[in-house]
Amino acid sequence: MSLVVNLVLLVFLLVMALAVLKTRHLFAMAMLFGLYSLLVAGLFVVLDAPDVAFTEAAVGTGISTVLMLVTLASIKDGHELVSTQKSRTAPLIICIIMGGLLIYGTHDIAELGDPQSAPHMQVAARYIEKGQEETGVPNLVTAVLASYRGFDTLGEVTVVLTAGIGVLMLLGSRKKLRIKEVSNGK
Amino acid sequence: MANDLILRVVTKWLSPIIILFALYVQFHGDYSPGGGFQAGVIFSSAILLYSLTYGLDAALQLIPEYILRIGASLGVLIYGGVGVASMILGGNFLNYSVLASTPVAGQHLGIIIIELGVGITVASVMVLLFFTFARRVAPE
């Protein structure tokens, strides 16, 4: 059953990726990326990672798609991708080399669900054995993220805040922009 | 989109349910999948849905921008504050065990509070990002 679901999701992922490559319309591209994220969220559910699936569904499908659409709506033109007549062999070679390196890299990844793999032997076993009695939290993912890896999560939240501040500094001053536009226009 | 009756009604019914689900993910995150980050993005998607249907001005009336700016910083402050509080109570930075009478209760309390901080920051920043981008769209 899981195999069938995986197969369907992966085939649709491939179709979406090819459709993104094929389409020239940027609005359609943004929507296809949203669908792609939704399929990835489905894959995360199959992989027993509902936390990540929540995030992928909300951020990938919802927020980032909306941000892309808003960005497209805020620019006047350029909604169609202009194809250039430049040679495409160099990008193709780079893509093939990168893809080959990535596929080569997957040989070192432990088999999915293999209990003998390195990360499962050392620290994960400790979390599973002691996690619940040390933190009193039944959800081990939360226990690891919030307690054992509390420093990392603090850094993560700070990154989110920093990203927000960065966007505000770049785009937040709407009034100044308007004054400049008006003075340039006249 | 502001005149589409179906969209308006569906949004009106759907947004409270999404927010309720976000609160569930937030405060039930120690028993079921979820946590602060997930709750924050789900909450902000409800606000995004509302402002896509009813317009940016209505959403700004719902949540003014200065509240979002305060919220974004407040979440990190809560998180860091828990760390400092555990230092004051005699533990290491972010060692929640000293927060309550027993270490396990302290851990549980600390995790709930820092998840709340994460949720507030993530929700505020996500909505703030959308507002900042959406304000650049020229009114028709």
Image (cartoon, coloured by chain):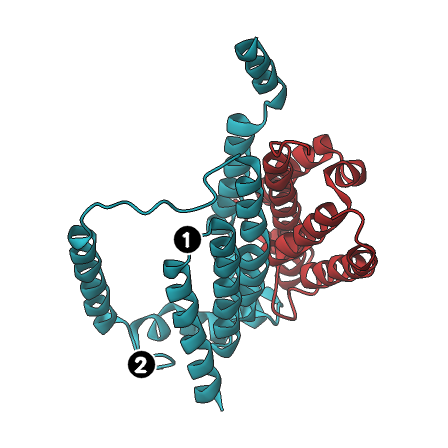
Chain colours: A cyan, B red
Mark 1 vs mark 2: tell me if same chain: yes
Percent of width and height locating residue B127: 65, 43
Residue tagged by mark 1?
Answer: A24
Give the CA distance from mark 1 to mark 2.
47 Å
Disc nearest the viewer among 1 and 2: 1
Direction from residue A64 to residue A137 in the image, left or right = right
**Mark 2, secondary structure of its residue:** loop
**Label 1 chain ID:** A
For label 1, the SS is loop
User: Crowding at label 2, few (<14), some or many (≥20) Cα neighbours within 10 Å?
Assistant: few
Residue A15 lies in quadrant:
bottom left
Q: Please state, as top left, top right, bottom left or bottom right, where the C terminus of chain A lies in the image.
A: top right
Instruction: Name the residue at 16% across, 54% down.
Output: A89
Q: Amino acid at mark 1?
A: Arg
| Residue B92 seen in this snapshot | no
For badge 2, the amino acid type reads Gln
Query: Is residue A139 visible in the rendered structure shown here?
Result: yes
Say if A106 sits above or below A65 in the image. below
How many marks do you count on the picture?
A: 2
Query: Is A177 in front, or is A161?
Result: A177
Q: Looking at the picture, how far across and down is residue B21, in whole percent?
A: 73, 63
Q: Is residue B54 above or below residue A166?
A: below
* x, y percent for residue A43: 48, 74
Crowd band around label 1 with a 10 angstrom C-alpha radius: few (<14), some (14–19), many (20+): some
The residue lying toward the viewer, choosing from A107 and B2, is B2
> Viewer-proximal residue, A64 or B83?
A64
Residue A176: % across, % down: 59, 16
Task: Identify which residue, B31 or B5, lies in the foreground.
Answer: B5
Q: Chain of mark 2?
A: A
Left or right of B87 in this view: B14 = right
Q: Earlier in the sequence, mark 1 or mark 2?
A: 1
Q: What number is the disc on residue A116?
A: 2
